[in-house]
Image: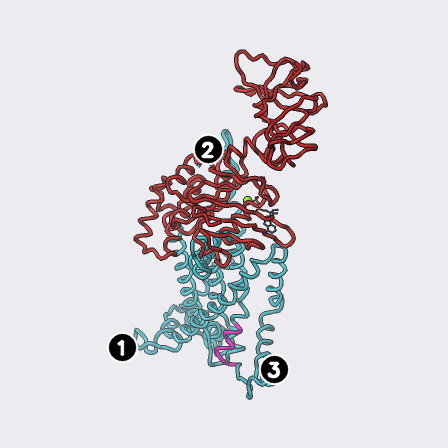
Amino acid sequence: MNRTDIAIDIDRVVNRYDSVTALHDVSMDIREGEFFTLLGPSGCGKTTLLRCIAGFEDVTEGAIRLRGEDIAPLPPHKRPVNTVFQQYALFPHMTVLENVCFGLRRRGWTEMDAEGRAREVLDLVRLGDFAKRRPTQLSGGQQQRVALARSLAPNPEVLLLDEPLSALDLKLRQAVRVELKQIQRETGIAFVFVTHDQEEALTMSDRIAVMSEGYVQQIGTPRDIYEAPQNRFVADFIGETNLLDVEVSAVSGGMPDLTLPGGMALRCPAADSARAGRGHLSVRPERISVAAAAEDTLPATVVDHVYLGTDIHLHAKLSDGEPILVRIQNAESSAIPATGSMLGLRIEAGAARLLVD
Amino acid sequence: MAGAAPGGASRSEIYRGNGPRLMLPIWVFIGIFLVMPVVMMAVHSFLTKEFRGGVIWEFTFAAYDQFFFDRGLFGDEPPKIEWTYIGIFWRSIWQAGLATVFSLLIGFPTAWFIATRKPNVRPGWLFLITIPYWVNLLIRTVSMKFLIRDTGPLNEFLLWSGVISEPLSLVNTNFAVQLGLFYSYLPFMVLPVYAAVERYDFSLSEAAADLYSDNWTTLRLVILPVVKPGIVAGCILVFVPSLGAFLAPDLLGGAKTFMIGSLIEEQFKGAAGNWPFGAAAAMILLAIVLGVLLLHAHAQTRVER
Ligand SMILES: Nc1ncnc2c1ncn2[C@@H]1O[C@H](COP(=O)(O)OP(=O)(O)O)[C@@H](O)[C@H]1O
Ligand SMILES: [Mg+2]
C-alpha cells in the first residue's frame, strides 16, 4: 500500500446524495505523471468522483489519499489539486492574465512573480497574445485553453479535467486531444480526465477506469480495456463487439471450452472469474474472417452489407437467428457476399473472449 | 455585422425602421409629465416670491441667493455663506447614505438567501418581501411610530422582559428616521440584488475555491464584482428616494432631523411657503441626483472598456 509512485489513492469510496448512491465502493490508484481517464456513460458518477477529489462533494464512506495523506479534512481551497471545469467557469470580470494569476496570488506569489509564471503558462497553451483580453472576447477553444492555463499555473499535484473537450466541435476536439496529451507529458502532472467518449479515452490515456452506474467496471491500459474486457458492459461500451450466447462445458488453466450456437467448439481466453455454465462470448467484428461453409466454421446467412470505404460491414444471422456483425477489409480481391448466401465464419482462438456478466 | 437576408429587409431593419413611430407615445408622455414639470420647476426657481404662496413673474436669483448666502453676492459687504440649508442637505445626504448602507447590509444577505433557495420556492419568498408594500407608505410609517413610541409594543416588551428599566425614547431621533427610510426602501435593494445573484454562476465560486481562495476572498474578489451591477442599481434605488423622502423624517424624526424633502414640502404648504425657494431647493436636489447617476454611468463605461 505504500508505493511512492501513487499520486491519488481512492479507497472504497461511497458517495450518496439524499436517496441516490452516485458512487459504490469505488477504488483506484492514480499514479504520478500518468494520464488517467474516467470513462463511462452520462450519469455514471464521473463528475461526482472528480468533485470528491476536489472537495466539492463529501465522501460518505471510504477515503481519498493524496500522496498517502487523507484529504477528507481539507476544504477545497486547501487541496493542492486544480480543476478544469466542464463549462470552464472563467472569471468574467478579469482579463485572461488576471484569471491565470488568480490561483498564484492566493498562494502568496507576488504580483510580479505571478505575472511571469502566468505568461509562461499562457505561452505553453499558445495564448501569449491574448493576456489582456476578457474571456467573453475569446472563442470556445481559446476559453478552454485559458481554463487549462489557469489550473496549471499553480503547478497542482494532480489536475482534474471534467469533459474539457465536450463543448468544442469535432475538428477542434481532435486537435486539442493531441495538444492536451503533449502538455500533460511536458508538465509531468498527473491528469484525471473525465469523458464519455471512448475514442477520446483510447487515444489519450495511459490508463482508463471504465465506470457504469456508480461502479468501477474495469481499470487498465487502453489495450487491456479494448482487447481483454472483463465483462459485457465494458466489451459493449468500448468499440463494437458481438456478444454471443455460449455454453461453457469446463474451464481449465484459465481457458474455457465452450460451444457456439451452431455447435462449433472453441477454446479461448476468458475473464478471470469465468466458470462453467452459460456465458457470453465477445468477438470483435474485425477479428472474424469469412470462408466457404465448412465443418470447422460457424454457419451464417448474409442479411445485408454496409459499405464503409476502407471496410465493409456484413450483417449476418447465425443458425439460431442471432445477429452477428463482421467487418471485412475492402481489398481488391474481396468480393462482397450476396444477401441470402451462406457463409462459414472463422473465429481465431485468440480473437474471442468469454465474459462474465 | 452580417445577417441581413439578401433581397429584403432583415427583421432587425424592419424593427429599426418602425422605431421612431413606436417611440412616439412614450416621447409624448415623457414630454408632458416629466420634462414639463422640471421646466416649470426651473422657471419658478428664478421668479419672485408672492406672499401667501404663488409667484410674481419677475426674474431674480433671490431663491438661490437665499439658499447659499446669508449676505448675498450683490450687496456692499463681502458675501457670507448661509449654512442652514447646506447643512440640511448635508444631513440628508448623510442620512440617505446611511440608509443605503443599512439596506445593503440587510438586503444583500436576504437577496442571497432567496436566490439560493430551490427555484420553485423563490417566488414565494419574493412575494413575502412585497407584502408590507401593499399598505400605503403613510400608514406604514405611522404604524412604525406607534410601534417604537415610549408606550409602544417595542418598549413595553423590553420593559417586561427586563432588558431596560425605563422606556427608550426612539421617536424623534436619527435612529427612527433611519428605521423609517430603511423600512420604506429595503425591497428596492433586495430585488435588483436578487436578480443579479440569481444569474450568478455558482461554478465561479467553486473555481475560486479550487484556486485556493477562502470564502471571504471569494466574496470579495469574485462574487461582489460579478453581482456589482445589481448592488449599484439597488444603492441608487434606495439612495435617491431616501434623499428626497419627507414622510419618514417628518413623522419619525420631528424637527431635529429635518431633511430636504420636508424643507421642500414646507415651501409649497400654506401661507408660510415660498415657491421660488422650494423650486430652487428641488433643482439643487435634482442636480445632486443627476451628479450621482452620471458618476455611476461614467464608472460603468470604464468597466465596459
Ligand atoms: N446534486 C445532486 N443531487 C442528487 N443526485 C445527483 C446530484 N448530482 C448528481 N446526482 C446523481 O448522481 C449520479 C452521478 O452523476 P454525475 O457524477 O454527474 O455523472 P456523470 O458526470 O458521470 O455524468 C447521477 O445518477 C445523478 O443523477
Ligand atoms: Mg459529468
Which chain wears cyan?
A: B
Residue A28's label in the rendered image is none
Q: Chain of mark 3?
A: B
Q: Secondary structure at mark 1?
A: loop
| Amino acid under disc 2 | Gln
Q: Is residue A338 above or below residue B281?
A: above
Question: Who is closer to the viewer here, A73 or B156?
Answer: A73
Note whether residue B55 is visible: no
According to the image, label 3 marks what residue? B157
Note whether residue A190 is visible: yes
Q: Colour of chain A?
A: red
Q: Which quarter of the figure has residue A295?
A: top right
Q: Quadrant of the C terminus of chain A?
A: top right
Q: Secondary structure at mark 3?
A: helix
| Amino acid under disc 3 | Phe
Q: Is residue B281 magenta?
A: no
According to the image, label 2 marks what residue? A174
Q: Residue at x 60, y 76 (%)?
A: B143
According to the image, label 1 marks what residue? B78
In the image, the segment drawn in magenta is B171-180
Q: From the viewer's perspective, is the residue at label 3 or at label 1 nearer? A: 3
Q: Residue at x 55, y 20 (%)?
A: A311
- The Cα atoms of the two marked residues, 3 and 2, are separated by 72 Å
Q: Are marks 2 and 1 on the same chain?
A: no
Magenta span: predominant SS is helix
| Amino acid under disc 1 | Pro
> Residue lying furthest right in this view?
A320
Q: Is residue B102 above or below residue B208?
A: below
